[in-house]
């Protein structure tokens, strides 16, 4: 009979512990810009995660997590697949043409993050 009140107390305490954690998720967006080079089949790829860029210092280029070297992509498809493997989902894609140069392709992605993960990133 003493087990029942103990069980209720244990459940109540565990419920209070769960109330303290913020499990809210926030959508974050990133933009991938692919631009062809004139007289070449090479493509320049820039990924913008919305971070603030410093004028002097602060290398924001994508780096391989294992080697620490700057990530290079063989094609636009390679870059899109990389973001997909990182958990990003494509939202929108569109080209912008300029009469004097190559087309510039914009790809927008989104990903769900825990709210606490975003707050910790912004504090640094």
Image: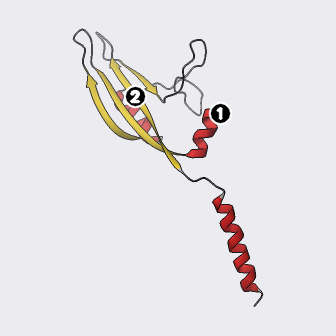
Q: Secondary structure at mark 1?
A: helix
Q: Residue 119 occupies which quadrant of the picture?
A: top right
The image shows residue 124 at horizontal and vertical percentages of 65, 31
Of residues 79 and 100, the one nearer the viewer is: 100
**43 on left or right of 86:** left
Question: Disc 2 designates what residue?
Answer: 32
Residue furthest out toward the bottom: 1
Comparing labels 2 and 1, the label whose residue is closer to the camera = 1
The image shows residue 29 at horizontal and vertical percentages of 44, 36
Question: Disc 1 designates what residue?
Answer: 123
Which residue is at 64% across, 38% downward? 120
Q: Residue 55 occupies which quadrant of the picture?
A: top right
Of residues 97 and 72, the one nearer the viewer is: 97
Q: Residue 98 occupies which quadrant of the picture?
A: top left
Above or below, comparing residue 19 to residue 109 in the picture: below
The image shows residue 50 at horizontal and vertical percentages of 49, 28
Q: Residues within 10 Å of mark 1 (few under 14, many from 20)?
A: few
**50 on left or right of 91:** right
Which residue is at 69% across, 72% downward? 12
């Amino acid at each position: 009979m003493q087990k029942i009140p103990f069980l209720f107390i244990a459940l109540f305490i565990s419920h209070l512990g769960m109330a303290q954690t913020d499990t809210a998720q926030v959508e974050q967006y990133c933009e991938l810009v692919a631009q062809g080079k004139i007289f070449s089949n090479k493509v320049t790829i820039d990924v913008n995660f919305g971070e603030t860029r410093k004028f002097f210092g602060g290398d924001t280029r994508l780096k391989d997590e294992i080697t620490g070297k700057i990530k290079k992509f063989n094609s636009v498809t390679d870059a899109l697949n990389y973001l997909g493997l990182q958990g990003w989902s494509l939202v929108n894609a569109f080209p912008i043409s300029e009469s004097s140069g190559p087309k510039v392709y914009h790809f927008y992605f989104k990903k769900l993050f825990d709210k606490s993960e975003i707050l910790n990133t912004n504090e640094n």
